[in-house]
Image: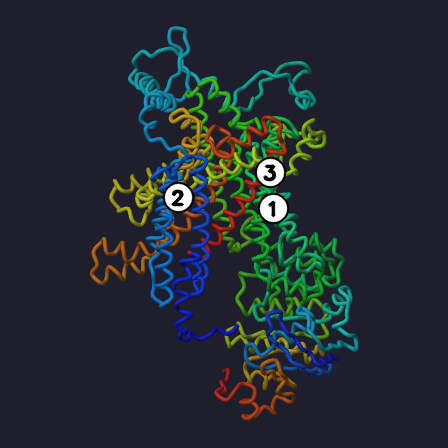
Amino acid sequence: MLKVENLSKIYPNGTRALKNVSFEVKDGEFLAVIGLSGSGKSTLLRCINRLIEPTSGKIYWNDQDVTAASASEMRKIRRQIGMVFQQFNLVKRSSVLSNVLSGRLGYVNTLPSALHLFSAADNSKAFASLGQVGLAEKSHVRADSLSGGQQQRVGIARALMQDPKLILADEPVASLDPVLAHTILKYLEQLNKERGITVLCSLHFLDLVHRYATSAIALKDGEMVFQGLPKQIDDAQFKAIYGQEAERVSLL
Amino acid sequence: MAKTEAVPKPVANLLVVRWSSLIIPGLGQFLSKKRTRGGLILLTIVVLAYLVNWSLVHQNIGKIDVGGVVTSWLWLPLALFWAWNVLDARALAVQKTSSPLIGILCAAIVLYVIAWEVTDVRLNRLVERFNDARTVATNLLNPDMITITVNGQDQICAWRCMDTYIGDKLAGRPVDGPIRASDNLLQIFGNLKLVPAARWQVDLGLATPGSKVKAFNAGSMIVTIAMGLMATLFSTILAIPISFFAARNIMARLPGGAVIYYVARGILNVVRAVDTIVWGLIVIVWVGLGSFAGVIALTIHSVAALGKLFSEEIEHIDPGPVEAVTATGANLIQVIRYAVIPQIVPSFLAYSLLRWDINMRSATVIGFVAGGGIGFFVIETVRMGGYQQYATALWAVVVVIVLVDFISGKWREAILKDQPQKDKNTSRPFWNGLRVAFYTILGLLVFIYCWNLSEINLGNLFSPGSNFGLLIKDFVTIDLSPDVLQPTIQQLIVTIFQAFLATTLGALVALPFSFLAARNLTGRSRLSVWIYYLTRALFNVLRSIEALLYVVIFIFWVGIGPFAGMLALAVTSFALIGKLFSEAIENIETGPIEAVNATGANRLQMIVYAILPQITPPFVSYLIYQWDINIRMATIIGFAGGGGIGLTLTTFFGSLEYHKAGTVVAFIVIIVALMDFASAKLRQTLV
C-alpha cells in the first residue's frame, strides 16, 4: 500500500509544484492522476520514488518511510517500483535487449553489470518480458529503430524486469498517436488485473480515465482538488479541475 | 520576476539619465536599461585611456608637442568617443535608437594606430628587402626532393629540372645522369638502412645473431605522425575518466561533488590556456629533449582540451534514460554504464578524431622547443640556411596534414550520422570476427611501432632532470618586481595587438576569396568551378602549415620581430577565416533569396537584402573566434622570432629564471582565459 501524507514540493526557483497532497493507493488499484500540464502530476510521481526530493511530507510504501530511506534502502525500494515515461526514456543507441536488461540493475552486483554480464535467468526473463509486450523478435535492434509505440512497449518490458509491485506511469501515452494509446494502456491494465500490480498513471484524456482507472485523483496548481471514482467526475468537477473555459474532448 | 511596465519617467530623472554619461561614461546607457552597452562603453574608455597613456610613456606613440606640453594626439579620438557616448546616452534616454558607428570608429582609430606602432609594422621593409625575399622564395619554390647526377656531381633537381628530364625521357632524347630521391627527402620520410638484427628476428629464425638486416629507418615526418597518434591515444584514455569529474550533472549526484566539479573545471581551463609549445618548454626540463617530451607536451594540452569537450558532452546528454535507469534502483556506476556511456560514444570518438587533426598540426612544430619530429628538422635546416631543404619539409607537412584533415573529417561525419544499421543479419559473423581480429592486430602493430618511434620511456617520467625540482618550486612563486612586470605587460600588449592586426588583415584578404570558394554563389561554368576548387585548395594548403613555420619565412623577409609574427598569423588567419566564411556563405538559406528575387530585385539588391543579413552574424562570430585563436598562437610565435610574449618566455626559460617564467605563464593563462570567456560571451550575444 502506498500512502502519501501532506506532500509538498517547492523548487529552488520558488515554484510550488505540490501543496499538502495526501492520498492512499490500495494494492491492486489502478489510480489515474489527472490535471492540466504543469499541475504537478509529474512532480508527484517522481517524489514517490524520490527522483525528485520532496520538500516536506511523508510517503509510506508498505509502511516503510520512503522519505527517510538511506541511499541503499532507496535503491531497494526503487527496484520494487517500475516506472514508465512519456518520452519512453530508452537509451536510443543501445539495443532493445540492453534497455530491457537495465531494468534488472537494482538486483545485480555492480561489477558484473558494469561488464554487461547478466545471468542466464535474467536474460531469459528479458526475453519473456519482451514476449509479453509482443517484441521478442526485435531484441537485437537498436532502440531508435523502433516506432514510438514499440519504444513504449520496451519501456514497459524494462519496468517488468523489476518484478514491480507498483508501476508509476508518467503520461505514458501523451507522446503517442491516439490510436496507440489503447494498446499501451491495455498492457498496463493487463498487468494490473492479471498480476495484481498497482498502477499509478497520469493521464490527459478523461475518457481514458473512465475506461481504465479504478479510482482517480485530480491536481490543480499543485493542490489535490478531487479524489474518488472516475465516474464521479461530472461536468462541474471537470470545470473545477480544468478551468471554466475547458471543453471535453473525446479520444476515438 | 515581474517585469515592470514602462512608465513615463519624471523629468528630473530624465535629465540625470541624459547627462550622467558626461561624468561617468556609460552610466546614462546603464540607467536606460542598456546595461551591456553601458558596461562596454565604460570598459572601452578605461582600456583605451590606459593604452594611450601607456603607449605615450613607453613607446612615444602619437607624441605631439602642443605649446610646450608633450601629449598624445590619440587623446583626440578618445575625447570624440566620450562626446559620442554623451549623445548616445541622450538619444537612449528619450527612447530613440542611436547608431554606435561613430563610437566604434573612434575606438578603432585609437586601437589601429597603437596596434600599427607596437607590432612594428614597416611596410617599407616588404619592398626594401624584396631581393632577399625573392632569393628565399625561389629556394622555397624549388624544394630539395630529387637529386640528379650531372658529370659525377650531385645537384638538386627541382620542378623545372624534373620537367626537362621527364620531357626528354619521354621524347627519347639523351638525359643527364641518373636521378634518385634526395638525401633530404629520405631524411624526412625515411630510408632503408642496414642495422643489427633484432632479437625477435633471430628468435623467429629470420636472421642469424650478429648479422645485419635491412630495416626501415623512419624519417622525421613519420616520427611526427607517430607522436600525433600516441598523444591522441594517451589523451583520449586519460580525458575520459577526468571528464566525469568535470561534468556537473554527474557530480551533482555525489556528496561534495560540486567542489570536485569546480576544481576539475578550473584545472582543465588553466592547463588548456597554456599552449602545447609552452608545455614543451616545461616538459623538456622534466624528461629531456626528444620526441618523448613532444608526446608528453601534446598529451598534456590535449587531455585538458578533450576533458573540457568530453565533460560538456556528458552534460548535454538526454537526461531521460538517466532518470529511467535511476528509477530501476541502479547505483551511480550502473547509471553511468547503462544510461550515460552508450549516449556519449559517438561524440567522444568524433572529438578524439578532431583532436587527432589538431595534435598532428601541433606535432609539426613541437620539435621547435621539445626536439623530435619535423619541427626539430626544420630548426636545424633553417639554422644552416637550407631553405630548399625546408621547402621539402613544408611540402611534406602539407601532404600529411591535408590528408589527416580529410580522413578525420570524413570519419567524423560518418560517426556523427550515427544511423542504426538497417539489417544486421546480412553480414556473416565469421567474416565479421575475422575483420575485427585483423583490425585489432593491425592497430596493435601500429601502436607498438609508434611507441618505439616516439621513444616513449615511462621510466623517464619518474627520474626527472636535475632542474625539474627547481622549476616546480620556482614556478609557483609569482614575481611581480618591475623588471618582470614591465616587459611582461609590454609584450602581452604586443601579443594582443599582433593577434588583432593579423585577424583584421587576414579577414580583409579572405573576404573576397571566401565568395569564390562558396559553391552556391560560384556559377556553373567550367571556369568558376575551377576557381572554386583552386580557392578551396589554397585555403586547405595554407591552413595545414602552422604559424610557427610561416614565421621562419617572414623573419627572413621583414626581419625578426612582431611584424614577422603578425604576418605569419595573418596568413593562417586568412586560410581559416576564408574556409569558415565560405562555409557560412554555403549554409545560407535559399528561401529569402528566392523571395527577394520574386519581388523583381536585381543582383546587388538581392545580395544586400537576402545574403548580407544572413552572413553578418556568423562572420562577426568567426572574427571574434579567430582573434581568440590568434591570441593563443601569438603567445608562442616568439619562439621562432615572431616577437611578443613568447620571446620573453624563452629568454626566462633559457636563463633558468623559472620564477620569472612562471609569472609570465600565469599572465598568459589569465589573458587567454579572459579572452576565451569574453569571446564566448560576445559570440553568444551576437549570434
Residue depicted at 62% across the width and 54% down the height: B247
Q: Viewed as shown, does residue B383 lie left or right of B148?
A: right
Mark-to-mark CA distance, 2 and 1: 32 Å
Q: Is residue A110 at least partly visible in the picture?
A: yes
Instruction: Examine the rendered structure and indicate whether residue B208 appears above or below residue B472.
Output: above
Front-most of B605 and B334? Answer: B605
Give the residue pinned by disc 3: B480
Q: Amino acid at mark 3?
A: Leu
Distance, label 2 to label 3, CA atoms, is 27 Å
State which quarter of the image contains the N terminus of chain A. bottom right
Asked if labels 3 and 1 share a chain, the reply is yes
Is the residue marked by circle 1 packed among few (<14), some (14-19), or many (20+) residues within 10 Å?
A: many
Q: Position of residue A25 (x, y in %)?
A: 71, 82
Mark 3 / mark 1, whichever is N-terminal = 1
On the image, the x and y values in percent for residue A183 come to: 57, 76
Mark number, residue B268 = 1
Q: Chain of mark 2?
A: B
Amino acid on which disc 2 is placed: Leu
Residue bearing the label numbered 2? B111
Query: What amino acid is labelled 1 in the image?
Result: Leu
